[in-house]
Image (tube, rainbow, N blue to C red):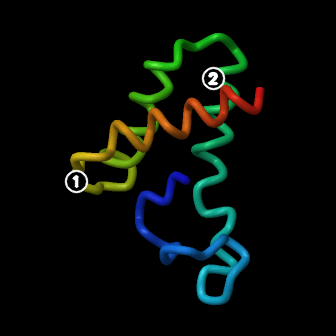
Amino acid sequence: MWDTIGLMPDGCTWRDGDVAGFEDEYDSYLQNATTQLRQGVPAAEVVRYLVKVETVFMGLSQRTDTMLRARAVVQAILAKA
């Protein structure tokens, strides 16, 4: 869901062909986001964290869907909690 650098082609999963081996690429960031949410950090702050990871830590330009994707990830984490 949160493939910031575009490793996974449309219609693939992390265990498919060319992307196998990259399935843990974002784990540390997503684990951090999950931990923050479990510790009661507001969802909006975790969204900002994911945006910062993408735009500052990874050095990517903010796109029109950056915030939407980060929100979707936070909502998915919260739905599984």
| Gap in angstroms between the C-alphas marked 2 and 1 | 24 Å
Residue 11, compared with residue 71, is above or below; it is below
Q: Pointers 2 and 1 in contact (CB under 8 A)?
A: no
Helix, strand or loop at disc 1? loop
- Indicate whether 55 appears above or below 24: above
Q: Residue at x 75, y 32 (%)?
A: 80
Is 67 above or below relative to 60?
A: above
* Image location of residue 48, percent across then percent down: 39, 28
Q: Give the image location of residue 58, x and y in percent.
A: 38, 55
| Label 2 or label 1, whichever comes before in sequence order | 2
Q: Is residue 46 left or right of residue 37?
A: left
Give residue 33's position: percent from left, percent from top.
Answer: 60, 33
| Residue at 62% across, 43% down | 30
Q: Quadrant of the C terminus?
A: top right
**As drawn, is 64 to the left or to the right of 23?**
left
Give the label on residue 46, or none. Answer: none
Badge 1: residue crowd in 10 Å (few <14, some 14–19, many ≥20): few
Q: Secondary structure at mark 2?
A: helix
Quickly name the residue at label 1. 61
Q: Dot 2, how many residues are within 10 Å of its Cα: few (below 14), some (14-19), or many (20+)?
A: some
Residue 70 appears in which quarter of the rendering?
top left
Please name the residue that numbered disc 2 is placed on: 36
Nearer the observer, 45 or 15: 15
Decide: is 42 above or below 62.
above
Given the current orientation, which residue lies at the most extreme front position?
Answer: 11
Under mark 2, the amino acid is Gln
Q: Residue at x 61, y 80 (%)?
A: 19
| Residue ID at (49%, 59%) | 3
Q: Amino acid at mark 1?
A: Ser
